Image (cartoon, grey):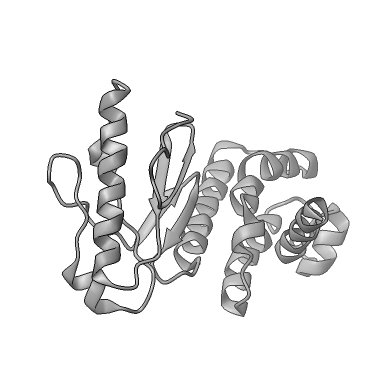
Amino acid sequence: MNDINRRVDSTLLSFADDTHISCAVRVSEDVHHLQNDLGTVYAWVNDSNMQFNEEKFEVLRYGTNQDIKDNTELYMERGMQITPNAHVKCLGIHSSDDATFQHLIMQSVKRARGMVSWVLRTFSSREVQVMLTLWKALIEPILDYCSQLWLPQKCRDIQKLEAVQRNYTRYIRGMKDLNYWNCLEALGLYSQQRRRERYRAVYTWKII
């Protein structure tokens, strides 16, 4: 795979079996340039005796130039159009064409709530140790995953994510009559917002 970006001017990134190619498109000629680079990659695939799964081809378009979006297309090797999508998932992260992570936050909250419901249906114990173990093993990773990238700034997004932990802790034995912050203190937990801020600080420190 190391030479897949040979003779490609656009930005090409690969991880395991996922490959992404991107470039800035300011005029329609830039789309032709990107299509030519796709053709170069298709040629590399044939020369390497490999094959892309064209059913998984996706296009994500950022920007406000609606004219270019409406009047330009990109094609697979066999001539079929690659369908533009509003959201594309890459390595577990949903990127959206509005350059926000609203869709990702909604999906994370939905998945986490679903896991909370499964835990409460499946396990009868509400003891602290059991509930905390299940939370940290099954639910918290969903809310933490790659949060350094999508750390929310809007109050409504912060509250949606916080509500998952707030609702879960109410089911833990002895926590029902405590307010949320006293509950976190008793359980030795950070708030979700604090966890995300801490992850970003640690990540930045590692980069520096």
Location of the N terminus (image quadrant): top left
In front of the other: 68 or 140: 68
* Residue 67 drawn above or below residue 52: below
Left or right relative to 37: residue 168:
right
Q: Residue at x 32, y 39 (%)?
A: 41
Location of the C terminus (image quadrant): bottom right
* Residue 70 drawn above or below residue 169: below
Q: Residue at x 26, y 78 (%)?
A: 66
Q: Residue at x 76, y 67 (%)?
A: 180
In front of the other: 13 or 190: 13
On the image, the x and y values in percent for residue 174 come to 80, 54
On the image, the x and y values in percent for residue 67 come to 22, 78
Left or right relative to 80: residue 84:
right
On the image, the x and y values in percent for residue 144 come to 65, 52
Q: Residue at x 41, y 64 (%)?
A: 96
* Residue 75 drawn above or below residue 52: below
